[in-house]
Amino acid sequence: MTQNYDNDLQSIQEARSLAEAAYEAQQKFFRFSQEQVDRVCQAMADAAYRESARLGQMASEETGYGIPRHKMLKNHLGSKFLWEAIKNIKTVGVINEDRARGIIEIGWPMGVVAAVSPSTNPTSTVMYKTLVSVKARNGVVHAPHPAAAKCCVETARVMAEAGEAAGMPHGLVGCMSKISLPGSQELMRHKRISVIVATGGSEIVRVAHSMGKPAYGVGPGNVPCYVDRSADIKQAAYYIVSSKAFDNSVICATEQAVIADKPIAAQLRAEMERLGAYFVNPEQAAALATALFSPTGVIYPRSVGQTPQKLAEMAGIQIPASAKILVAPLSKVGKEEPLSREKLTTVLGWYEADGWEAGCERCIEMIRFGGRGHTLVIHATDENVILQFGLEKPVFRILVNTMGTLGSVGYTTNLMPSMTLGSGGIGGSISGDNITTTHLMNIKRVAYGVRTPPAEAMVDAAATPPPPPPFTGGQGGVSQAEVEAIVRAVIEEVLGRKGGY
């Protein structure tokens, strides 16, 4: 007789099974050399890159969000582009030796990562979190958004198969297929989970931070884009429209409003209109606000990642078929103006400010209204203005003369490629960094004595304490090979104890 089990119970059991399997596999993976780890990661990055187009198409079809070719580009970022950035990072054994300070640093994995992924960037986030976790010798179990379960499971399968073919222990990379909130919570609180990386809505991030474990969560990104009178106006317009249209604006660091310096505002608007920005009138803006947001200010999921034409249909307004984005002129920031909120869809706010000081104040208003610690974009050539924005704004990514979408994640800047953008303490996050493999690795430090202790600290204050022997590290009495052998022996001895390391 076929039994029908409650989905929540199935999800909870799957979470437990995957966490245990990842732990057992990670205990074996812990013994891998740097060369073996990198071989596994290279194989997974290559496999994900090869499948980027198919997985991007799958993500768009399953979620109904975004543009397949743009999701492919994000998959490229989360696979090959990311791997090129982290492949030379040492994560195994002695990762650094500072002879001057008498410090030897040894890489140590955290254990098993619970990786919560959103529906907006599902496959690229699974790729990215798999690579940054495994590079640091961690196991990883993905908990996808229910609306993106199939594409996430397939992405994890592609990477796990490639990794296992390269020698990775079975079960090191897992992905939940039966998704529920109780199941995701069970995964995050499971005794085998050492750290949580949560990317998604504010609610799931709050849940992650409530689990009593180390957690990297990211807050919302109500990203202002200031265009100064010193900017290259044509370039600024081109980047802004392209960025807001990219994957129908589902990356959290997408520009949410332009703050245009008054002397160049008309020129900037004309350039943006030429590129496909359609400026709505006040009545159309009000209709869009009603279509996008509930009375409590929560964005309707149906409006996320949609084309301007689809949004116009929802709002009951007429717009040109050529429109790439919709722009709403606004005068206020706050609850009374819904379109001043974060909008993960193709609607952009528009403000004008006379001078960079006024622009600065408007940007801070936006950041405080839902974007603390996240990202700001500035288009300018006046280095003083750029520096003032860098000093003043309460955000941890300030992007200059580039696209908010691709600049924030490290595609068009030298920021670390990442799909989890920390918003720092002011944004409720443990870090303001682009989260990467170094955040998922602990470092042990072997510290040699380098200074003679004070006489007052000794049992015989009258005696002169002998100085510590000089630290020679790999250049003196103990060779680098001997240090590595010692580390290996310690690891083997620790792993031989009950319960692993």
Image (cartoon, helix red, strand yellow):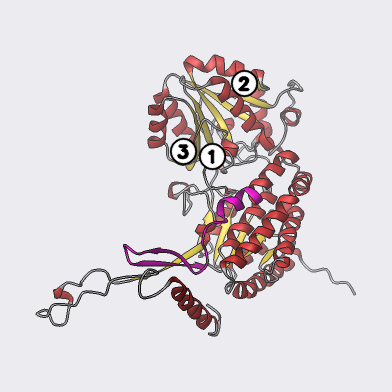
Q: Nearer the viewer, mark 2 or mark 3?
A: 2
Task: Name the residue tied to disc 2.
Answer: 272
Indicate whether 143 appears above or below 314.
Answer: below
State the extent of the magenta-drawn residues as a range: 80-109
Can residue 391 be seen in the rendering of this structure?
yes
Indicate whether 69 appears above or below 105.
Answer: above
Outermost right residue:
1
**Residue for point 42% across, 29% down:** 360
Say which amino acid is labelled 1: Thr
How many marks the image carries: the answer is 3
Mark positioned earlier in the residue sequence (2 or 3): 2
Residue 474 in percent (x, y) is at: 40, 69
Residue 427 in percent (x, y) is at: 47, 47
| Viewer-side residue, 173 vs 489 | 489
Mark positioned earlier in the residue sequence (1 or 3): 3
Task: Name the residue tied to disc 3.
Answer: 368
Q: Quadrant of residue 476?
A: bottom left
Label 3 element class: helix
**Residue for point 71% across, 24% down:** 323
Q: Nearer the viewer, mark 2 or mark 1?
A: 1
Are dots 2 and 1 in contact, CB under 8 Å? Answer: no
| Crowding near the residue tagged with mark 1, few <14, some 14–19, many ≥20 C-alpha atoms within 10 Å | some
Label 2 element class: helix
Is 45 on the left or on the right of 378, as rendered? right
Q: State the CA–CA distance, disc 1 to disc 3.
A: 25 Å
| Crowding near the residue tagged with mark 3, few <14, some 14–19, many ≥20 C-alpha atoms within 10 Å | some
